[in-house]
Amino acid sequence: MQTTAVNTIAPAPTPARAANPDELLDIEGLKTYFATANGLVKAVDGVSLQIRQARTLGVVGESGSGKSITALSVMRLIERPGRIVAGQVRFAGQDILKLKDDDMREIRGNQISMIFQEPMTSLNPVFTCGDQIAEAVLRHRGGSKKAAMLRAVDMLSQVGIPDPKRRAKQYPHELSGGMRQRVMIAMALSTNPELLIADEPTTALDVTIQAQILELMKALREQNRMAIMLITHDLGVVAEMSDDVTVMYAGKVVEATDALTLFDTPHNPYTKGLLASIPRLGEHRERLEVIKGVVPNPLNLPSGCLFKRRCPYAMPICDVAPPLRQIGENHVSRCWLTPDGGKPEIGEAPLKAEAEASSASLTVEAR
Amino acid sequence: MMEYPTAAAAVQAATNGSTDLVKVENLVKHFEIRGGLLGITKLGAVKAVDGVTFTVKHGESLGLVGESGCGKTTLGKVILRLLPATSGRVEVGGKVLFDIPAAGEKHRKAQMLDNKQMKTVRRDMQVVFQDPYGSLNPRMSVGELVGEGPLVHGMTDKKQREALVRDILGKVGLNQSHIHRYPHEFSGGQRQRIGIARALALNPDLVVLDEPVSALDVSIQSQVLNLLDDLQKEFGLTYLFIAHNLAVVEHISDRVGVMYLGKMAELAPVDEIYTHPQHPYTVALLSAVPEPDPHHRKKRIILKGDIPSPANPPSGCRFHTRCWLREQLGRPERCQTEEPLMREVRPDHFAACHFSEEINPKAVADAVIDTAIAPTPITPTAAMAEA
């Protein structure tokens, strides 16, 4: 095999990272695998990302990217045949993967809350909306049922539901999709969490209702100084809401930087392909750009770079899986191309060693 | 600007009648709601489509957009006679598919093509559905799925059919050797291509596409959209493209119709409707779409409340309960009492609003400010303090 090396500007990857007090959530080297009947699916395969206090991180990816499983792993909601097999998830400095179940329950729904894509299937159909919100309050704040219900009605009003007292007594099926999503947001925020994980919160909603919900989330995060991990495939929503963005593909982080940089100067060919292929309002293109091919089958992943078969820049080097590499001060990309997008120079040192070394310590991190 | 006695007349006057492939007049589809002890009492009706008139010219793409309950999907199905209409007239390729008089139209006789005649017409109008997983029979191979149409319409020679199917599969970008595979062996995007191949097998004039890319990943959407573009040019197809994604509709359409609660709110050429919307709902819809550009985090018009139920639509103008323009104009009574008819507000541009002329950039800017959501402070309630 040809030994090639790459001119990198990356410093050697550091094995351990000092805890940064500003960081609320620090995921390092997360691996969540599913042992299915057809084989091992590496849904999340060495993902690292950080979210700082009161910042919004957009996690972008398509089907099979692993973004939802990452969120569920943080919440420790992974069930068999899935298992978190490696990595650390530090929340406010503490590795929550190591917590006992009881201790995790203190955090889940309390300091870290989650809202899901399909409000109808995520809300319990046999309990009233008010009861479901009050349950979270009672569980984490104690107190009387009456007080919890008052808080529930208060939350419903805060998320913009008119006539909240009446709505609190209604069941999820009596509410529209947008309203149910608001109920879920009310439930998630009732305990004043520091981190909200939102998994495709507006995908199932009409566009005018989506606008309402996004505006609501913006208002609430500002007022509560809440960090948000916003998972979506919609680049418009990412641009609207995010301070920072992480792009995922086939279980790995392929690019991470702040939102402005990602949209202005994306580095990773997958990100570029994604941005180029979406139709945008007001544009008059004859043909859309296309990413050829399909997302790889997780049971049959190619060797080397997972994107190489679809990549317009594919080179022989891509047979060696690239690590995340520093592209700019706050910008990493999983690609052998140089920071300015050019082909790498061929040098002396063995390439494979670099890839292996960095994958052992998992990274150059994505700030 | 001229006003016309009926919406049909307005649209007809502007479009050149002879180049129309599809003519839809006053189409109504109500779904009855029944209840009571034996489920036979008529409680009301879901007015899914409540009087829609438009045409589709040969070779053009008409995009239909709208949100939940607007009736766009039902409209597509009724035009294809996959659902029976309640009343109205639909003509495709010069043939009257049906003409059912409404309750008050005693003087008109009903017309209806019988099943045998419809079968011939169905060759020329095909459909591509939204769900690539549900719209293909899992027990039929790709070859059987795509070849079924030709078989039903007389192509009994197996070799001839296979040749046709292989040809079409190639045209939609599928591997011809996969002809004996089953749907579950393909990805979502590939299945959608199979659905498109199936629609093309009979070389139709009209293809109704109901949300054909909504269920696909973003990177696959553009592949399928480009394919649809190419096929339209190659086969001279006419598209009725139903979707909720405004950017997708803008890309593929020549003209766009915006629907709200069973009615057509606006109908215009694509450039016109996106640059000079003449209906406050269209304005709000365009405003709501998040733009993939973090430098331009736009302020939007936020509509209040939910979309009303089509079983109980508001009186007068259906949109008046959420209309920002009506608020700005001091809630004129006309919006509540008088249903606006489609009228030509700009050349070849129709909108159903009493006050389209009041829409201008300043009005829109004011609406954005008026509707911005301000954060409400969380004040601990006394009861919580007790807890």
Image: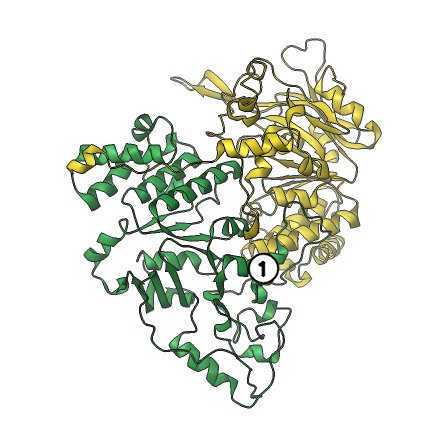
In the image, residue A265 lies at what x, y percent? 58, 63
Picture quadrant of residue B128: top right
Residue B82, can we see it? no
Q: The C terminus of chain A lies in which quarter of the figure?
A: bottom left
| Image location of residue A179, percent across then percent down | 40, 34
Amino acid type at image mark 1? Asp
The residue pinned by badge 1 equals A264
**Above or below A353: residue A239:** above
Foreground: B102 or B244?
B244
Indicate whether A248 appears above or below B13.
below
Q: Position of residue A358 (x, y in %)?
A: 43, 78
Up the image or down, A170 lies above or below A108; here it is above
Q: Colour of chain A?
A: green
In this view, the residue farthest toward the bottom is A348
Which chain hosts label 1? A
The residue drawn where x is 82% and y is 32% is B19
Q: Secondary structure at mark 1?
A: helix
The structure residue drawn at horizontal position 48% and vertical position 35%, both measured from the top left corner, is B372
Q: Which chain is yellow?
A: B
Relative image position of residue B178 (x, y in whole percent): 64, 61
